[in-house]
Structures are given as structure tokens and as C-alpha cells.
Amino acid sequence: MAKVLGALGSGQVVIDREDGSHLATHPLPEATLAEALALVDAGGRGFIREEVKFDRVIGLSSCVSTGTGDVIRYATRVNRSFASRFVVGRSEVECRSVVLILALKKEEGVEVLSGEAKYVLITAYVGELAPPEPWDECAFGLATDPLAAASQSKQFWDCHALVWGSQPVIEGTATDICPW
């Protein structure tokens, strides 16, 4: 049975993935996650991608902007299929927001607006809303304009990276060559 993580402000229960929770790679205190979820209104959406802002620092973001002097490395993170862009020798930065990505759990006979509807947490992390990584073609397929979404992703990730050492990577996958 899936773990219940909390409820949205509109009443829907949020459960964790049964296969490969992203919470393992994005440390987020349960109380902070529950507080962020409670600030979201489903509004009849089947897919929710939202940045929840707080009036206090709630953690450290591992996504930072990069420049020409930075040392870049690519590696596959745990619970991911392809390599992410990392920057070596940088530190995480204090942050006042949490990003939540949720999908309505498909169950027969459950209305989207019903208080009984359940959402599955796709991912949650301390940080600002960022486009999916360039390899995530499934995410681009959800966009109104998939080609524009893919282009925006590449532009963002060409000048942003995750801090090396901030997240576990699969051993033997590190490279200095951009795989996308």
C-alpha cells in the first residue's frame, strides 16, 4: 500500500509512488512537505506542477546557475533513467520554496473534484520551479507545445546545474561529456 504523505488544501489525499519514490533523492522534512501540500488547491487539475512559497527559509536548493568558469559533470541520479547536469565545487543555496509535481491517480468511479480523489507525488524538492531535464521527453509530451518546452528545457539546463555531491548518483555513470 502506498504511503500517505498528506492532503491538499482542497482535500485530496496525496500518496507516494510505489515504484521509485523521488523523496529518497530530495531530502524534505515530512512536516514541510505536508505544509506545502496543504497550501495547494487541486482546482480540478489532473496534473499539478506548482511552486509553493514560504515566508521563511525552508531548506537548501541544489539547483544553481552556472557560468563559463564552472566545472560541469554529468551523471545519472538514483531513480532516474538518464544523466543530469552537475556543477563541481559549488554549494547549495538557501531557499524559501518547495516545488510539487503531482498526478491524479487513475481510479474508476472517482471524480477529479471529489474529496476522495488521490494524487500521486511525482516529485517534490526544495527550490524554484524549473523545466524538466532535456532527456525527459514524457514531460514535454504533456506541454501545449512540446518543441517549445524541449527548447526551453535545454536553454535552462545549459546555464543551470545541480550541485555535485548534493544527490546520490549511480556509480560509474559520471562523465564530462554532455549526453544531450
Image (cartoon, rainbow, N blue to C red):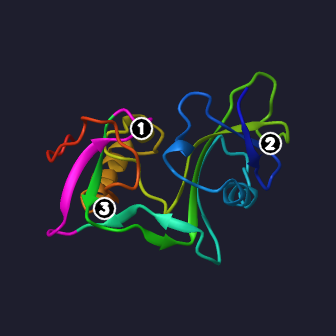
The residue at 49%/66% (across/down) is 60
The magenta stretch is 67-81
Disc 3 marks which residue? Answer: 160
Q: Quadrant of residue 96?
A: bottom right
Disc 3/disc 2 C-alpha distance (Å): 37 Å
Discs 2/1, front: 1
Disc 3/disc 1 C-alpha distance (Å): 20 Å
Using the image as rendered, state which of residue 109 and residue 4 is in the foreground: 4
The residue at 76%/51% (across/down) is 8
Considering the image in quadrants, where does the N terminus appear? top right
First in sequence, mark 3 or 1: give its number.
Answer: 1
Residue type, label 1: Val
Residue 28, above or below 103: below
Tell me where residue 64 appears, x and y as whole percent.
35, 66
Q: Residues within 10 Å of mark 1 (few under 14, many from 20)?
A: some
The residue at 73%/51% (across/down) is 43
Q: Quadrant of residue 78?
A: top left
Residue type, label 3: His
Residue 76, above or below 130: above
User: Relative to residue 143, is residue 35 drawn left or right?
Assistant: right
- Assess whether residue 4 is covered by the magenta stretch: no
Disc 2 marks which residue? Answer: 113
Q: Quadrant of residue 115?
A: top right
Label 1: state its secondary structure: loop
Q: Main secondary structure of the magenta part?
A: loop
Disc 1 marks which residue? Answer: 78
